[in-house]
Amino acid sequence: MSEIKIHIVSSNNVEAKKAKRDLAKLYKNYPINKANTIVALGGDGLMLQTLHDNINRDLPIYGMNKGSIGFLMNKYNEKNLLKRIEKSISAELHPLKMKTKSKNKIFTAKAINEVSLLRETYQAAKVKIYVDGKERLKELICDGLLLCTPAGSTAYNLSAHGPILPLTSNLLALTPISAFRPRRWKGALLPRNAKVRINILEKKKRPVSVVADNSEFRDIEYVEISEDKDIQLKMLFDPKTNLEERIINEQFIY
């Protein structure tokens, strides 16, 4: 393996900033255009932001937890950092791409975790679901709905009682949020190449917003979601705590 040249980023909390200064004293902090690996210090929010910020760069990201939630991060340890990066295991992900229409304008965004639809008012959302051009659910009344990647299946999806997806499953999870009708519909597992379209019914009476990770669009008419196969993201994990193992472990925690 060629020489590892790291570029260090951190969240804005005091501990993360201090860790960045400490690491910069021990290891050379290369400019982003001369680095071949990014070291991210913070929580899962910083990891997602770093992935988004570098979505068009072919740079793996090694995260270390200096935030509140660190599911996507390794334990912080400043010793032998370059050797640990060299021995790390790569988890490769494809983000979701989303297209929506709001107030006669078309918007697009990328999501690494999930694309979620949420009601905007006291009125429940009413939607129609298509998969690969075929109507699958004529009407769903709910607080919301989300489509997640395997990496995102342990985040909002899990809180909404959706299934946890191993990285190698080649699946996406479509999960309702507080479904009212049909009450027994618990969601669906879809192949990763599925193209999902969700139409908003009674959109003036029941306004709905859509969120792709940290990009929000309100008063939408529809949303189209599919995996973006042109973009490949890489996260690096220590061998004993790789992401696949964490996803399995999460299913046995109560």
Image (cartoon, rainbow, N blue to C red):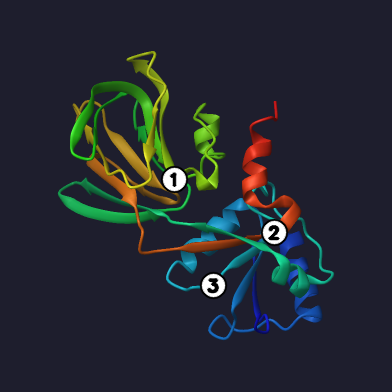
SS category of the residue bearing label 1: loop
Q: Type of residue at label 1? A: Asn
Estimate the x, y position of residue 219 in percent, counting from the top left.
Answer: 26, 39
Q: Nearer the viewer, mark 1 or mark 2?
A: 1
68 horizontally vs 192: left or right: right
Q: Type of residue at label 2? A: Asn
Q: Is 163 or 155 nearer to us in this picture? A: 163
Q: Label 2: which residue? A: 13
Residue at image coords 26%, 45%: 224
**Above/below status of 118 relative to 140:** below
Determine the CA span between mark 3 and mark 1: 23 Å
Residue at image coords 81%, 79%: 26
SS category of the residue bearing label 2: loop
Within 10 Å of the Cα at label 3, are there few (<14), some (14-19), or many (20+) other Cα atoms? some
Q: Is 248 or 35 nearer to us in this picture? A: 248
Q: Type of residue at label 3? A: Leu
Residue 122 appearing in the image:
no
Q: Nearer the viewer, mark 3 or mark 2?
A: 3
Residue 115 appearing in the image:
yes
Quadrant occupied by the C terminus: top right
199 horizontally vs 18: left or right: left
Q: Label 3: which residue? A: 59
- Of callouts 1 and 2, the N-terminal one: 2
